[in-house]
């Protein structure tokens, strides 16, 4: 049914479906029902501050050519204008409203848990999917039945010739990064390939992954919750594929404000959540090998932010976030059981997955002083972690560690 949008009929037993939303639903042209078992669900977390860009996001969903989805819009706190806009553009969408603002991770998780699709797409409210987005994802999922998640080719909305991400990665020392970020879009990013994980701005997850791994860790609030989920998924044996034909245009950090024009909130959350991710979700021997190099990497990042004229910003906010992460270390360690209790892969598989991600990081080197510095440091840290991993493999040390 090309050019139409679909959603499951609201009913009283669905989370977030209020009497008001059922009463105000108007089923006009471009809206139809998906039934009880749709192929796709699309989850859009939003809030009252997203009115400037939310409409474009919803119009992009409505314009999908194939695989008409169930749509769930999660309103993070009071957002009457956003709900009215959603009813106008996507009258069949399900509304999941929060009374209070809880953060992106909580809003996205609520949508992921409520979704009925066999493939569950997550789309930022500042991202616009191209009309063949779901079609491309469905094709990739059909051709790769053993892949657990799928990453989009995300292009910058203000300059579509530049890449925002082609998947994301994580090093053994806990440094997260977006593949291809800031690079010109071109042939190297037009090829399908395995990646570490899918950025949450435009990701697709199989229902089985969400069932076995769970949704986002709501304590992250925002930032790196998707990297944390990717790590937990890899530890459970779920791989990720980058699908270049699935294109999305993304404003980037519209809600929290990243960079010199922001207030430092984004940098604080990233620094805090990097510590939590390592302590909570990194398998034990990987953490033992990389703990000291991880601290060195964090220190180097803070030092770089303090250099006048560097392309890093908000050093004080990043320092505060790091200290918050260390302060909450006990709670993060206590959460390791739920995060890693169902682990299915061994240490060598974890090392291989993170090593492959590090190779992708090194592909980013050489474009500007900041990237060249990052590459040099990554090479040194990789050699350091290699030596520590060899020591852990030593029989005497392994006996002490067991």
Image (tube, rainbow, N blue to C red):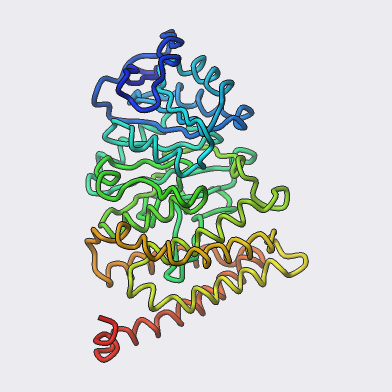
* Picture quarter with the N terminus: top left
Q: Is residue 323 above or below residue 215?
A: below
Q: Quadrant of residue 30?
A: top left
Q: Position of residue 399 (x, y in %)?
A: 24, 87
Q: Position of residue 318 (x, y in %)?
A: 63, 62
Closer to the camera in the image, 26 or 320? 320
Closer to the camera in the image, 285 or 348? 285
Closer to the camera in the image, 220 or 294? 220
Q: Position of residue 108 (x, y in %)?
A: 43, 39
Q: Is residue 25 above or below residue 270?
A: above
Closer to the camera in the image, 111 or 345? 111
- Furthest residue to the right? 308
Q: Position of residue 206 (x, y in %)?
A: 29, 41
**Horizontal side, residue 100 vs residue 340: left or right:** right
- Residue at (40%, 81%) from the top-left corner? 386
Q: Quadrant of residue 272?
A: bottom right
- Residue at (27%, 49%) from the top-left corner? 147
- Furthest residue to the bottom? 396
**Horizontal side, residue 136 vs residue 382: left or right:** left
Q: Is residue 168 above or below residue 302?
A: above
- Residue at (35%, 23%) from the top-left corner? 68
């Amino acid at each position: 049914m090309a050019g139409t949008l679909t959603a499951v009929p609201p009913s009283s037993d669905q989370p977030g479906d209020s009497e008001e939303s059922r009463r105000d639903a108007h089923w006009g042209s471009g809206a139809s029902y998906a039934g009880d078992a749709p192929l796709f669900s699309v989850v859009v977390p939003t809030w009252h501050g997203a009115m400037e860009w939310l409409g474009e996001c919803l119009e992009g969903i409505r314009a999908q050519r194939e695989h008409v989805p169930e749509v769930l819009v999660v309103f993070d706190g009071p957002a009457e204008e956003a709900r009215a806009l959603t009813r106008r553009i996507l009258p069949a969408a399900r509304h999941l409203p929060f009374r209070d603002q809880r953060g992106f991770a909580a809003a996205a998780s609520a949508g992921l848990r409520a979704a009925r699709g066999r493939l569950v797409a997550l789309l930022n409210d500042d991202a616009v999917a191209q009309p063949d987005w779901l079609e491309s994802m469905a094709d990739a999922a059909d051709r790769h039945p053993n892949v657990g998640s799928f990453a989009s080719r995300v292009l910058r909305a203000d300059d579509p010739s530049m890449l925002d991400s082609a998947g994301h990665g994580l090093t053994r020392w806990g440094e997260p990064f977006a593949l291809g970020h800031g690079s010109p879009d071109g042939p190297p990013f037009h090829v399908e390939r395995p990646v570490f994980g899918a950025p949450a701005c435009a990701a697709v997850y199989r229902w089985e992954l969400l069932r076995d791994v769970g949704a986002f860790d709501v304590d992250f609030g925002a930032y790196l919750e998707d990297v944390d989920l990717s790590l937990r998924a890899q530890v459970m044996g779920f791989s990720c594929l980058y699908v270049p034909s699935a294109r999305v245009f993304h404003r980037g950090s519209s809600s929290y404000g990243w960079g010199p024009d922001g207030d430092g909130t984004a940098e604080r959350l990233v620094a805090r959540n990097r510590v939590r991710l390592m302590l909570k979700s990194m398998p034990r021997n990987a953490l033992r090998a990389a703990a000291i190099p991880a601290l060195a990497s964090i220190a180097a990042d803070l030092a770089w932010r303090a250099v006048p004229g560097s392309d890093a910003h908000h050093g004080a906010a990043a320092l505060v976030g790091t200290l918050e992460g260390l302060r909450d270390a006990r709670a993060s360690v206590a959460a390791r059981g739920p995060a890693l209790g169902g682990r299915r892969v061994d240490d060598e598989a974890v090392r291989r997955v993170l090593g492959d991600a590090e190779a992708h990081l090194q592909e980013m080197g050489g474009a500007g002083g900041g990237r060249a510095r990052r590459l040099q440091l990554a090479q040194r840290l990789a050699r350091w972690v290699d030596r520590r991993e060899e020591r852990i493999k030593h029989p005497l040390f392994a006996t002490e560690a067991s």
